[in-house]
Amino acid sequence: MSQYEEMIRKTANPLENRIASVFVHVTNLRESAEWYSRLLGLPIREDRLNGGPVYWFDFQGTHLILDSNSVNRQNPDWNQDMMPRMMFPAMDIDEAYLLIREQGTPLFEPERHGPMAYFNFRDPEGNVQMACWTQNREEDPSLAGLSRSPISPRIGGVFVDVKHMPAAAKWYSGLLGAEYDEAAAEQRIYSVPTASGAALLLDQNRHLNGESFSELFFFETEDFDGALQFVRSYGFELAGEPQIFPDLSEFALLDPDGNRIVIAQMNEGGQ
């Protein structure tokens, strides 16, 4: 590596500006894998239920990882408040660790397992995320052609609950090398610009409304009424009534562990 390349490597942001995966932490891996597969009209992958701690969906843009934490629970140094919400891909895991050590709180040094390395960290408000480096990444196949559901196998946005919006928006924007919009940070939801995949949505609604629950992410649909009829006819548990706003329509579901998952359609002409 030349001196110039080394300088570029050290000055470039070691984290990619996108969400590689979102985690859902579950107690029964098979039950959850079947629930999400049924919701999205996808076939179950038995080869991913082979005794390992995770089941994953290779969505286009941002993946979904169901994590039973069965391996983590065997570690005496691990506890549940170390579970990450999302994974940011790292171009250099050691540089990413140094960045987080300066700006956040790493929970452990990078762990290396063959062609991958990762560590978890807390943001200034205590939310836990993961930085992960993998070797020889490949483009992810889309599952859209396999789906037999009006709910698309595509994660449109991932939520992070925050209390202090301007500070949180500035921190995540700086972490990912994204432009910070001071005016937009006065709103209840701030979308951190990402290069691809799911939107990173900082959400102050829980704090301002005094709500005890969290919403993890939203699946997209192009047929809101059809999606609502589908989940009702198949017995999925709704969390409250559907909400219709000028710019979007949405409803929330409870998965087998009580995680709130949103189904949303952007409305044309909404402001």
Image (spheres, rainbow, N blue to C red):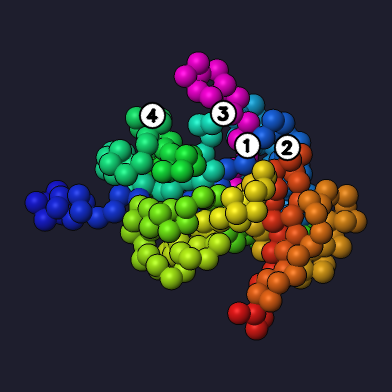
Q: Earlier in the sequence, mark 1 or mark 2?
A: 1
Other-residue count near label 1 (Cα within 10 Å), few / some / many at <14 / 14–19 / ≥20: many
Rendered residue at 83%/56% (across/down): 231
Residue toward you, 137 or 186 = 186
Res 260 visible: yes
Q: Image point 65% across, 83% down: which residue?
A: 269
SS class, disc 3: helix
Label drawn at residue 108: 4
Q: Residue furthest right?
A: 233
As shown in the figure, which amino acid type bears the numbered disc 2? Asp
Disc 3 residue crowd, few under 14, some 14–19, many 20+, Cα 10 Å = few
Q: Which residue is mark 1?
A: 25
Q: Is residue 70 magenta?
A: yes
The residue at the point 76 percent across, 65 percent down is 243
Q: Amino acid at mark 3?
A: Gln
Q: Which residues are magenta?
A: 59-80
Q: Quadrant of the C terminus?
A: bottom right
Q: State the CA–CA distance, disc 1 to disc 2.
A: 8 Å
Residue nearer the viewer, 108 or 28: 108
Indicate whether 56 appears above or below 158. above
Compared to residue 66, the image places residue 140 above or below, namely below
Horizontal placement of 230 versus 78: left or right? right
Marks 3/2: CA–CA distance: 15 Å
Closer to the eye: label 3 or 1? 3
> What is the CA distance from the residue labelled 3 to the residue labelled 4?
14 Å
Report if the CB atoms under discs 3 and 1 are less than 8 Å apart: no
Which residue is denoted by mark 3 in the rendering? 80
Looking at numbered disc 4 in the image, what kind of residue is underneath it?
Phe
